[in-house]
């Protein structure tokens, strides 16, 4: 079985995001970029399936700017077999929307014929949480979202997922699209020898036009603002003072 894993280049989760002065978006100048954490978990899970003998090949895909090849090299260093980079934008500030990404992924799935697509449940830059579901609909495949545990049983995948009332376990027919949550695993660090080997692994470059997909944005970002600063706390010297302050604030 072949496993396809889409990965996205995003601002590193440790970086404090800065909004542009004109409010047109996020400032990416000289900002550290890395693989979307949810996608990193997807890559790790695909590699574990291969190590367990349940997958034969792990193919990673990234759709965006040319610099995304760095993200793909990271996935190859972790243990993926080959990569496909679809250059769909020249400007690092242009975000390819989920529907366009899903259409390109459908074309790649048609070519590659994987038995499983493992996606991160969302990207931490736009929090869309839509690409996996859209791909499933376009393909007519089953889907399982927010997976915190995945196992392959013959021609079915068994997925445990967190819901409001607790944990839910479902069984879906393969081929399928699974989106993963943070609880699924702990991604490995790429060793130096594997980083060197990754440079020799195949990385094919394509364009959105090669797949006949229009990536023109359908959404317009009207304004981007910093979140409101939290008000400073108040120290109290006794329970009576605490109750008094809560009454003043209308909390009691």
Image (cartoon, grey):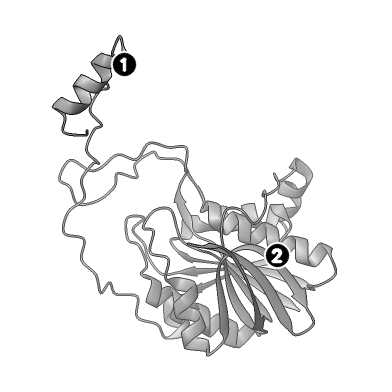
In three-dimensional space, the C-alpha distance between marks 1 and 2, rounded to whole angstroms, equals 54 Å
Position of 84 compared to 217: left or right? right
Q: Tell me the residue at 51%/54% (across/down).
A: 36
Quadrant the N terminus occupies: bottom right
Task: Return the residue at label 2.
Answer: 46
**Dot 1 or dot 2, earlier in sequence:** 2
Q: Residues within 10 Å of mark 2 (few under 14, many from 20)?
A: many
Task: Return the residue at label 1.
Answer: 239
For mark 2, give the secondary structure.
helix
Position of 156 compared to 15: left or right? right
Say which quarter of the image contains residue 212. bottom left
Quadrant the C terminus occupies: top left
Q: In terms of depth relative to the viewer, which is nearer, 152 or 204?
A: 152
Q: Tell me the residue at 20%/66% (across/down).
A: 220
For mark 1, give the secondary structure.
helix
Q: Residues within 10 Å of mark 1 (few under 14, many from 20)?
A: few
Q: Tell me the residue at 33%/58% (across/down).
A: 91
* Residue 125 picture location, percent across and down: 39, 53
* Residue 39 picture location, percent across and down: 56, 59
Image position of 32 with respect to 112: above or below: above
Q: Tell me the residue at 21%/50% (across/down).
A: 224
Q: Please, which residue is most extreme toward the top here?
A: 237
Position of 148 compared to 107: left or right? right
Position of 22 compared to 195: left or right? left
* Residue 64 picture location, percent across and down: 44, 64
Image position of 229 with respect to 75: above or below: above
């Amino acid at each position: 079985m072949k496993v396809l894993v889409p990965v996205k280049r995003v601002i590193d989760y440790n970086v404090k995001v800065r909004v542009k002065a004109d409010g047109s978006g996020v400032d990416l100048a000289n900002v550290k970029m890395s693989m979307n954490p949810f996608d990193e978990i997807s890559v790790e899970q695909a590699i574990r399936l291969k190590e367990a003998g349940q997958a034969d090949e792990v193919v990673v895909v990234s759709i965006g700017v040319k610099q995304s090849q760095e993200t793909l090299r990271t996935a190859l260093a972790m243990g993926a077999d080959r990569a496909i980079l679809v250059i769909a934008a020249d400007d690092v500030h242009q975000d390819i929307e989920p529907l366009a990404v899903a259409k390109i992924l459908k074309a790649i799935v048609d070519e590659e014929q994987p038995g499983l697509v493992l996606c991160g449940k969302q990207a931490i830059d736009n929090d869309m949480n839509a690409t996996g579901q859209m791909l499933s609909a376009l393909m007519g495949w089953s889907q399982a979202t927010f997976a915190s545990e995945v196992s392959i049983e013959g021609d079915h995948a068994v997925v445990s997922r967190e819901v409001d009332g607790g944990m839910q376990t479902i069984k879906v027919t393969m081929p399928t699209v699974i989106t993963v949550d943070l609880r699924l695993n702990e991604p490995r660090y790429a060793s130096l020898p594997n980083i060197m080997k990754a440079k020799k692994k195949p990385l094919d470059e394509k364009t959105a036009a090669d797949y006949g997909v229009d990536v023109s944005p359908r959404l317009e970002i009207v304004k981007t603002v910093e979140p409101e600063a939290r008000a400073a706390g108040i120290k109290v010297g006794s329970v009576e003072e605490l109750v008094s302050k809560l009454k003043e604030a209308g909390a009691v």
